[in-house]
């Protein structure tokens, strides 16, 4: 008997925002540095909300093109406690994490970016939190 991966929003379309150049079939995995910090991460993050993935790619470090991939979890996934427990009870951002890889199954070719002033305000806030030593992601 084969275990089918399960988690919140089972059956939804899932997204991952990044600046990495990937192709269908590639795997995104924990154990690498994240979009936001240089330390290796023990989780891979994704969302069932396109808006969350837009933030992910817009805030990702690096010079690559902002990309939003459609992904499929290969293992069980869970609510992202960085958001659901601390910022948005009930998980309205539909943000999740897994220790199993995510398989890239496609790319969102067209999406609306945040207005420059909104994006800059978010970047300024993240820079302030980092300067204060606040952990951005567990």
Image (cartoon, rainbow, N blue to C red):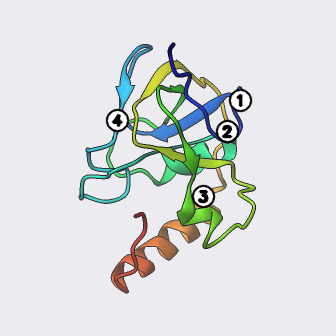
Q: Secondary structure at mark 2?
A: loop
Q: For marks 3 and 1, give the CA distance.
A: 30 Å
Label 4 Cα crowd, 10 Å radius (few <14 / some 14-19 / many 20+): some
Q: Secondary structure at mark 1?
A: loop
Q: Is residue 92 left or right of residue 18?
A: right
- The residue where tag 1 is placed is 12
Q: Are marks 2 and 3 in contact (CB under 8 Å)?
A: no
The label on residue 29 is: 4
Q: Are marks 1 and 2 in contact (CB under 8 Å)?
A: yes
Residue found at x 60% / y 73%: 86
Q: Is residue 127 left or right of residue 33?
A: right
Residue found at x 42% / y 63%: 137
- The residue where tag 3 is placed is 116
Point out the tag, 3 or 1, that comes first from the N-terminus.
1
* Residue 87: percent from left, percent from top: 64, 71
Q: For marks 4 and 2, give the CA distance.
A: 18 Å
Residue found at x 46% / y 71%: 126
Q: For marks 1 and 2, give the CA distance.
A: 6 Å
- The residue where tag 2 is placed is 48
Q: Is residue 102 left or right of residue 88?
A: left
* Residue 95: percent from left, percent from top: 61, 50
Point out the tag, 2 or 3, that comes first from the N-terminus.
2
Residue found at x 67% / y 39%: 48
Q: Quadrant of the C terminus?
A: bottom left
Point out the tag, 4 or 1, that comes first from the N-terminus.
1
Relative to 16, say whether 37 is above or below: below
């Amino acid at each position: 008997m084969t275990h089918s991966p399960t988690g919140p929003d089972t059956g939804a379309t899932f997204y991952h925002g990044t600046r990495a150049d990937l192709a269908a079939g590639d795997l995104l995995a924990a154990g690498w540095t994240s979009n936001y910090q240089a330390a290796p991460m023990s989780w891979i993050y994704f969302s069932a909300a396109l808006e969350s993935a837009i933030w992910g790619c817009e805030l990702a470090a690096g010079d690559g093109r902002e990309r939003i991939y459609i992904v499929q979890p290969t293992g069980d996934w869970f609510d992202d406690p960085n958001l659901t427990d601390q910022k948005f009870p009930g998980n309205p951002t539909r943000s999740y994490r897994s220790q199993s890889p995510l398989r890239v199954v496609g790319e969102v070719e067209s999406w609306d970016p945040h207005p420059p002033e909104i994006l800059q305000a978010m970047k300024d806030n993240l820079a302030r939190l980092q300067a204060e030593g606040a952990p951005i992601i567990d």
